């Protein structure tokens, strides 16, 4: 009964969902495109080969899934990888990384007839959901067709757990139909168990984002980019990554305080969402700062104070080209973004206090003194100044962060083994 009521409400809300797509399309025209895919109207796949369906919501989940998808392609060279996303930015990442080597479309809405149409066209042998994108109808329809469902790199904050608990009539039957949840940490696992997941459905693997690989090519590109940014003066570079609305002003205020002691400091400011690129550029200009766009292809001159990172898919490279990294989504209650990428580059990590999306990674980094949590303009400015004034301390902090990244690898292999077992048992 609960599932039927949920489905009815979803149908009734569909016009509002489409209106929201139109509204978002005012700034990002991609949201107005490919609506048919969201309703399951996708090209049919010929049967006769294994189909592994990987679903990631947006950019963050997609980037986390990239190493897993590449390894699945190696393990199952004859299989077809179907990769779905919900956002245009996630879609763009899939296309940029994999091209035509995977079958990519938008994920279907969680409606019975839409899922019926979609599943009839792609015939998946297993569904791998990245992190915690759980949809009741999706899980039920897959289980009805004997399609194993694996939740990979799963995380569940206390806030999210409380939200799922309020709808236990939907949550419990859904969890009971999931084959395996591969949780990032024991705390995440305990929260899933508290919602009704059984112990035999749970495996704590760790965070697959620690299994980041930096090859020689990207290291060389990062070194070249850093040389461009620093110029002949070898100016220091502060990267503020994945910022959200409400954070840019704090970062810019902190930056202007640091410039009193380090006037040559270059701020590389990278908003999380592309629809905010122009807004943040204007924000910098209104302050009288000399700002240059990374998309222009020009190297910043000594007179340029801010470089706006207005391209997609280059943040990992940017982390390798900076001296200090501040990771956004943490000064506002978003929950933080990937702290592991700067750590893997041996870069000192700064963050705001809102870190529930990366609670375990932040705990490990804080305990190792590879990261500092900053709240407010003055604290950020102080920490950046301290690190610039004490390069030995900055080097030690970066080394501590990298040690954490190196010591927590191995989750990816466990996850691949889980997927393999589900395929064999089907």
Image: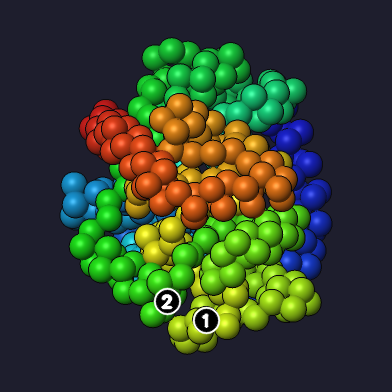
- Mark 2 closeness class: few <14, some 14–19, many ≥20 residues within 10 Å: few
| Residue visible at 58% across and 80% down in the picture | 304
Helix, strand or loop for disc 2: loop
| Residue visible at 45% across and 49% down in the picture | 390
- Image spot of residue 155 (x, y percent): 52, 32
- Image spot of residue 285 (x, y percent): 73, 78
Mark 1 or mark 2: whose residue is earlier in sequence: 2
Q: Is residue 326 left or right of residue 216?
A: right
- Image spot of residue 387 (x, y percent): 49, 49
Residue designated by label 1: 302
Q: Which residue is more in the foreground, 172 or 369?
A: 369
Pointers 1 and 2 in contact (C-beta within 8 Å) = yes
Q: Is residue 174 above or below residue 276?
A: above
Residue designated by label 2: 233
- Image spot of residue 396 (x, y percent): 36, 41
Q: Which residue is more in the foreground, 363 or 313?
A: 363
Q: Which residue is more in the foreground, 101 or 313?
A: 313
| Residue visible at 60% across and 17% down in the picture | 195
| Residue visible at 24% across and 53% down in the picture | 73
Q: Which residue is more in the foreground, 60 or 257?
A: 257
Q: Quadrant of the N terminus?
A: top right
- Mark 1 closeness class: few <14, some 14–19, many ≥20 residues within 10 Å: some
Q: Is residue 218 visible?
A: yes
Q: Is residue 283 above or below residue 197?
A: below
Q: CA distance from mark 1 to mark 2?
A: 8 Å
């Amino acid at each position: 009964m609960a599932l039927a009521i949920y489905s009815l409400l979803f149908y009734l809300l569909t016009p509002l969902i489409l209106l929201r797509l139109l509204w978002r399309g005012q700034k990002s025209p991609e949201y107005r495109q490919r609506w048919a895919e969201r309703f399951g109207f996708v090209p049919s796949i010929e049967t006769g080969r294994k189909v592994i369906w990987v679903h990631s919501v947006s950019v963050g989940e997609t980037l986390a899934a990239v190493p897993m998808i590449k390894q699945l392609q190696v393990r199952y060279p004859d299989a077809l990888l179907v990769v779905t996303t919900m956002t245009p930015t996630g879609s763009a990442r899939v296309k940029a990384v994999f091209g035509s080597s995977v079958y990519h479309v938008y994920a279907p809405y969680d409606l019975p007839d839409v899922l019926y149409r979609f599943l009839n066209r792609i015939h998946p042998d297993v569904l791998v959901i990245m992190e915690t994108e759980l949809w009741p109808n999706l899980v039920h329809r897959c289980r009805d067709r004997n399609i194993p469902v694996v939740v990979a790199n799963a995380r569940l904050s206390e806030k999210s757990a409380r939200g799922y608990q309020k709808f236990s009539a939907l949550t419990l039957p859904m969890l009971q139909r999931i084959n395996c949840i591969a949780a990032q940490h024991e705390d995440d696992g305990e929260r899933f168990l508290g919602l009704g997941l059984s112990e035999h459905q749970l495996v704590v693997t760790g965070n697959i984002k620690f299994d980041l690989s930096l090859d020689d090519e990207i290291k060389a590109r990062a070194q070249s980019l850093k040389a461009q940014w620093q110029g002949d003066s070898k100016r220091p570079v502060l990267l503020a990554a994945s910022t959200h609305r409400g954070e840019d002003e704090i970062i810019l205020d902190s930056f202007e305080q640091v410039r009193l002691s380090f006037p040559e400091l270059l701020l590389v400011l990278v908003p999380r969402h592309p629809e905010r690129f122009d807004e943040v550029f204007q924000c910098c200009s209104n302050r009288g700062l000399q700002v240059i766009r990374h998309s222009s292809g020009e190297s910043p001159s000594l007179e340029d104070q801010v470089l706006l990172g207005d391209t997609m898919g280059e943040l990992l490279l940017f982390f390798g080209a900076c001296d200090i990294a501040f990771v956004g989504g943490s000064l506002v209650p978003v929950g933080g973004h990937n702290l592991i990428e700067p750590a893997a580059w041996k870069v000192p990590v700064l963050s705001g206090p809102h870190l529930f999306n990366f609670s375990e990674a932040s705990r490990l980094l804080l305990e190792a003194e590879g990261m500092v949590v900053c709240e407010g303009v003055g604290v950020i400015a102080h920490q950046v100044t301290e690190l610039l004034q004490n390069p030995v301390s900055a080097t030690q902090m970066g080394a501590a962060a990298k040690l954490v990244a190196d010591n927590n690898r191995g989750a990816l292999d466990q996850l691949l083994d889980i997927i393999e077992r589900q395929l064999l048992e089907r």
